Image: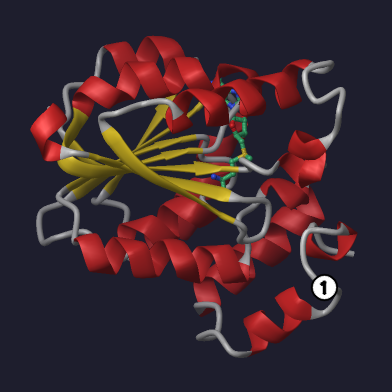
């Protein structure tokens, strides 16, 4: 059962959407299989539909620099890197050092080894030492720190740049009356509320998979 089948959309819709979406790149299909075989939490991977979406967004923006918070096995990094300008670079952060060995062969196979730099450690500390400006930031790590990551990256986002934030519907838990009672749900709910109150951005919470918040930093507020 997918996240979607659990109630956000009609059962079968995500499968139908996937069958009318460009096929998964062979390297990503291989990475997805390996993640399902070797990881305890394969559901953390973006997957086919969201992956093609990230790829499309990246092609539209043609970023020179991307920052990803939460690499896991490298699926979304490979998708986002597809639209990089010649000479462009994607930095991806994960606190789990095992992910570096996992992801590296797939970055290589995707022809992206020289375009992707993986940084290992706690995202908060690493972001503080990164310069920017970033044209796209993808936040997909520990949910309770979403707001902290947003505030850290916002000054490093290029004027008119984008922040994409995964899991902003959190399996529908954002709608529950006791939504603030666990730290992860509270993190997402507070984050969504904060973004909605900001004058300096345009935002849309897209109900794709588990919810992707797309935020554009208005150039006049930079
Ligand atoms: C949902 S997974 C990322 C999935 C990946 N973006 C994809 O779509 O394939 C979240 C990742 O965030 C990492 N993470 C969690 N807390 C972190 C922190 N404080 N600093 C850096 N990485 C963290 C985890 O180790 C995990 O690999």
Is residue 110 at least partly visible in the picture?
A: no
Q: Mark 1: is the Cβ under 8 angstroms from ligand 1?
A: no
Rendered location of residue 100, percent (x, y): 51, 37
* Residue drawn at (62%, 58%) of the image: 207
Rendered location of residue 123, percent (x, y): 45, 19
Instruction: Determine which quarter of the picture holds residue 112.
Output: bottom left
* Residue drawn at (49%, 41%) of the image: 165
Q: Is residue 170 left or right of residue 108?
A: right
Colouring convention used in this rendered image of the protein: secondary structure
Between 212 and 119, the residue placed more toward the observer is 212
Instruction: Determine which quarter of the picture holds residue 82.
Output: bottom left
Relative height, residue 15 to residue 6 (above, below): below
Q: Is residue 165 left or right of residue 209?
A: left
Between 58 and 119, the residue placed more toward the observer is 58
In the rendered image, the quadrant that contains the N terminus is: bottom right
Total tally of numbered discs in the picture: 1
* Residue drawn at (63%, 43%) of the image: 167
> For the residue labelled by badge 1, is the local secondary structure a helix, a strand or a loop?
loop
Report ligand 1 position as a quadrant: top right
Q: Which residue is mark 1?
A: 10
Few, some or many residues within 10 Å of mark 1 (<14, 14–19, 20+): few
Relative height, residue 91 to residue 103 (above, below): above
Between 200 and 135, the residue placed more toward the observer is 200
Rendered location of residue 38, percent (x, y): 77, 50
Is residue 88 at least partly visible in the picture?
A: yes
Farthest bottom residue in view: 20
In the rendered image, the quadrant that contains the C terminus is: top left
Q: Is residue 84 left or right of residue 190?
A: left
Rendered location of residue 102, percent (x, y): 58, 45
Relative height, residue 207 to residue 167 (above, below): below
């Amino acid at each position: 059962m997918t996240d979607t089948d659990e109630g956000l959309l009609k059962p079968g819709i995500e499968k139908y959407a996937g069958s009318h979406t460009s096929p998964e790149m062979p390297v990503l299909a291989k990475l997805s299989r390996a993640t399902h075989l070797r990881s305890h939490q394969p559901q953390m991977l973006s997957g086919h539909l969201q992956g093609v979406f990230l790829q499309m967004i990246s092609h539209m923006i043609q970023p020179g620099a991307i920052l990803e918070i939460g690499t896991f096995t490298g699926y979304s990094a490979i998708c986002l890197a597809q639209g990089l300008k010649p000479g462009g670079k994607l930095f991806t952060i994960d606190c789990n050092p095992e992910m570096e060995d996992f992801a590296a062969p797939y970055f290589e196979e995707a022809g992206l080894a020289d375009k992707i730099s993986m940084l290992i450690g706690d995202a908060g500390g690493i972001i503080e030492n990164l310069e920017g400006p970033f044209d796209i930031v993808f936040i997909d790590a520990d949910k309770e720190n979403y707001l902290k990551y947003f505030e850290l990256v916002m000054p490093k986002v290029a004027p008119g740049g984008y922040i994409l934030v995964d899991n902003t519907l959190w399996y529908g838990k954002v709608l529950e009356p006791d939504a603030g009672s666990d730290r992860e749900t509270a993190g997402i709910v507070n984050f969504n509320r904060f973004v909605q109150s900001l004058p300096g951005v345009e935002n849309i919470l897209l109900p794709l998979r588990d919810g992707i918040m797309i935020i554009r930093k208005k150039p006049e507020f930079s």
